[in-house]
Amino acid sequence: MTITRINPTYPIAYGNTWSSLEVDHNGVIYRLQVDSGGNVRLYKSTDGGASWSSQAITGASGFVVARSVTVTVDKINGRAKSVTAPTVSGYTFVSWVHCATSGWVGSCYMQVPTSSTTNVWVAAGGGSSGTGSVVCTAIYSKNSL
């Protein structure tokens, strides 16, 4: 099996039929993996990724949570807006995993997805002007199991 990491500092890995988000929590790596059929599995490695054991997602309820933030942006190409992930009591910020325009056509991306405070950049569709909403979603890992 070939495993590719996009960037060693960014927690995305993918294989031939799956992609995943990896979180290193006190030397234990957790992998939230989605396969090509849309199935979601949670894996755990205590040896730096040499071997993985399957974890029951139902038994890990609350281990990972997501929170979204809506920011107002200028619909002008090349504009950035600062965004800060909310604080979630008992959890540690892991990464921004998604951003999307809401109610208008455009695209966006997070400048530094592993930083809780970063910029969201916007590329507006043709004819867009004024302001619009962008929804940014972050994930968090529980501080203790």
Image: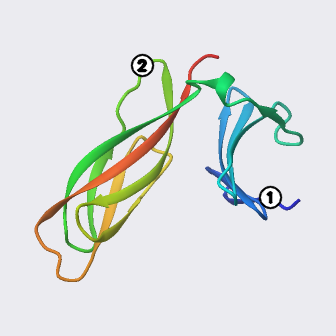
Describe the element under mark 1 as helix, strand or loop: loop
- The picture places residue 31, in percent across and down from the top left corner, at 70, 41
Which residue is identified by label 1?
3
At horizontal 89% and vertical 59% (from top left) the residue drawn is 1
Q: Which mark is residue 20?
A: none
At horizontal 26% and vertical 78% (from top left) the residue drawn is 125
70 lies above or below 133: above
Q: Amino acid at mark 1?
A: Ile
At horizontal 42% and vertical 40% (from top left) the residue drawn is 116
119 lies above or below 63: below
Q: How far is mark 1 from mark 2, CA to CA?
A: 34 Å
Which residue is identified by label 2?
89
Q: Is residue 60 left or right of residue 102?
A: right
Describe the element under mark 2 as helix, strand or loop: loop
Image quarter hosting the C terminus: top right
Mark 1 residue crowding within 10 angstroms, few (<14) / some (14–19) / many (20+): few
Q: Amino acid at mark 2?
A: Ser
